[in-house]
Amino acid sequence: MGNLILCKSRPAGRPYYVPELGIHLYTAEELSYYIYNHLLLIDESFPDERLFDFLRQLEQDKLEERIRRLREQGAGLYEILYVILQDLRYYSSAELFSFRKQLEQMSLSSAAGRLKAKGDALFARGKYYSALRIYNQILSSDSRDAASPEFASRLWISKGACYARVEDYQEALECLERAYSLNRDSTLPEKMYILNVFMGKDEAPAGLENVITPEKMEQYRSNLENRRKLAQYQGKGLEAAALLDKQEPERTEAFLELLYRWKEEYRRNQTS
Amino acid sequence: MNELILGIDLCDTYSQISAFSPDKPLPEPFLMSSDEASCLIPTVLCKMRGRDEWLIGSEAYRRALMGEGTMVDKLVKLLHKNGSATIEGVQYNAVTLMGHFIEQLLAFPREKYKVREIRCVAFGLTELNPELLDRLTAACDQVGLSREKIRFLSHTECFTYYVASQPKELWPNLVVGFDLSDTGLDYYELKAIRGRKPQILEARREPLEEAFDLDILETPVGERMADTILSNCADRMLSKKLVSSVFLTGEGFTSVAWAPDFLKRICNKRKVFGGQHLFSDGACLVAYDSTLPESAYPYICICEGRLASSISVYAVRDGKNEQLVLASAGSNWYEARVSAEFILDDVHTLDLLVTPFSTQRVETISISLAELPARPNKTTRIQLIVSFASENHVTVRVIDKGFGELFPAGGQVIRKDFLIS
């Protein structure tokens, strides 16, 4: 059986900005939700003056003091996050227990692994340039993980995916070539061929002529065609198809609105 | 005295005004002369010809009769039906006219006590109709009385507070009241339910069919007839009841010499009081009480104008699941509007608990939230607004507030009206 949760306080006049998501948080409940569900996006710089100002507006002065004290005592980020969730009491004991497990799992992974997870989380939210910055940061670091060919290959694949999403297919192809050179992942040739197709070249990328046989190329073409068809019934395609049920002039208006929203989304992705 | 605390009994025929005196903690009626009956101020307004001057009461009658101005009467009824009156070719709406009446009425205590500022005014009315109250609020606003300075009460509430202000020896058992005026004969009954904390005062009003035109009191035959009518009423209403006190009010009881039989019946082992300003005094007591940090009347009043049931909801506050009372039994329905915000945690229907004051049998009213947008759990904030159109009619509105910029609001509003006991 569910519960109603009485909201703690009025929304803050000066909201807390989350650049990774491009949104503002206004309430204690939103802050709790952000921490609980976007843990990968949060780094050591989180408990700062901006957060303290936000907590004061939410009349959480005691929590602010507690975090300051914890910081002075050298407490880690995860401990601080747990204390925030515990104090705001938005999540039940069972949910906090599960959160603690998540923190424990996170603390077991390496710094480079955690950073990559953050990059992946940003990618999943359409923040391709932010994700790229994270992947570059790991690749340029001298961490042991980044030196491993398998891990580095995964980073280059992720970079390639970011470039593909912002329609820079040449850069994307180069990233996948680097990834392939580090680790002969058998799924990569097809992706590289598709990038070539997107650039108007219906041929195997340079150096892969021996790997991508005419039969395989035919198979890749067929797969691409199927994906295109499928795309009409998923995600954005589905969103657009739903508007066909509307009558004119609402239909045209709805399409224009949808187009505007997509453009805005694209612009945002180009800059974040 | 820096600020006035007033009670106004606003009726269609006569109005009365009482002021809370700081010298002795009692309401003091405003009298136009030394005669007790002069507290009855005719609810009429007269605009002086060619001048922006307004008069009320007997003076308004007199000037209108002399042809010096134009008179408008039945101002409460006019306000109720949102009517208007045309004076010297200008149309005045009922709110404006009531505003002029209230302004002139307030001038009496302002002049008497030489105090202009008003702290609180409580209006006693026969009927608490939402539209009437909204228009009366607008009329008050017109004369500089903001919403937080005014209160509205039913006559039954005024009666209850008046009795509760009297020594407890007067109300160990039932207390009844008769209000005889040109507009009708009303019977009031107050019962103190002991053994519960806080103590409950349950009151009711019953308009009696035996009402008569007060003009019949102008002849001895009419007086005898009226006495017989009231005596029969007393027999019917008071038989087999343990009544401690009886209060008589209204212009019909300005004198009681015409009703010897009636008096004989009601005075039998009871204390009987007569007075013209019971409702304005009761209203004044409420006005004063609302200025205190803690009420001087630690009772739950259940009567016309007051909620007979509490409305509550179970919700988690600071990690603990508890019953939150949204509106308490005994609250004035007009002031009982409440708004609170909640997050839905796996909740698909909103269950409101209605608990009548007289029993502990809880009725659950479920409101489906299926119309709200589908979102992940704990990411829908709702604003719950509970308001009342009368003591029985509850309106519940659930407004989707989204979850900040994470999940923007859809603006859906779910409304449900229901009746409670």
Image: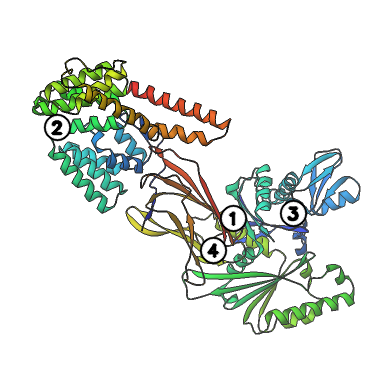
Q: Is residue A231 above or below residue B286?
A: above
Marks 4 and 3, how far apart in space?
26 Å
Marks 2 and 1, how far apart in space?
61 Å
Which residue is rendered at x = 50% and y = 41% of the image? B411
Q: Is residue A164 above or below residue B414?
A: above
Q: Is residue A83 above or below residue A48?
A: below
Which chain is home to disc 3? B
Q: Which residue is mark 2?
A: A111
Front residue of A53 and B295: A53
Front residue of B129 and B420: B420
* Circles 2 and 4 on the same chain: no
Q: Nearer the viewer, mark 2 or mark 3?
A: 2
* Circles 1 and 3 on the same chain: yes
Which chain is home to disc 4? B
Colour scheme employed for the rendering of this structure: rainbow
Point out the tag, 4 or 3, that comes first from the N-terminus: 3
Which numbered disc covers residue B334? 1
**Which SS class for mark 2?**
helix
Point out the tag, 1 or 3, that comes first from the N-terminus: 3
Q: Are marks 2 and 1 in contact (CB under 8 Å)?
A: no
Marks 2 and 3, how far apart in space?
77 Å
Q: Is residue B99 visible?
A: yes
* Residue A137 location, quadrant: top left
Crowd around label 1: few <14 · some 14–19 · many ≥20 (10 Å) = many
**Which SS class for mark 3?**
helix
Marks 1 and 3, how far apart in space?
18 Å
Task: Locate the C terminus of chain B by quadrant.
Answer: bottom right
Front residue of A139 and B220: A139
Query: What's the residue type where badge 3 is placed?
Result: Val
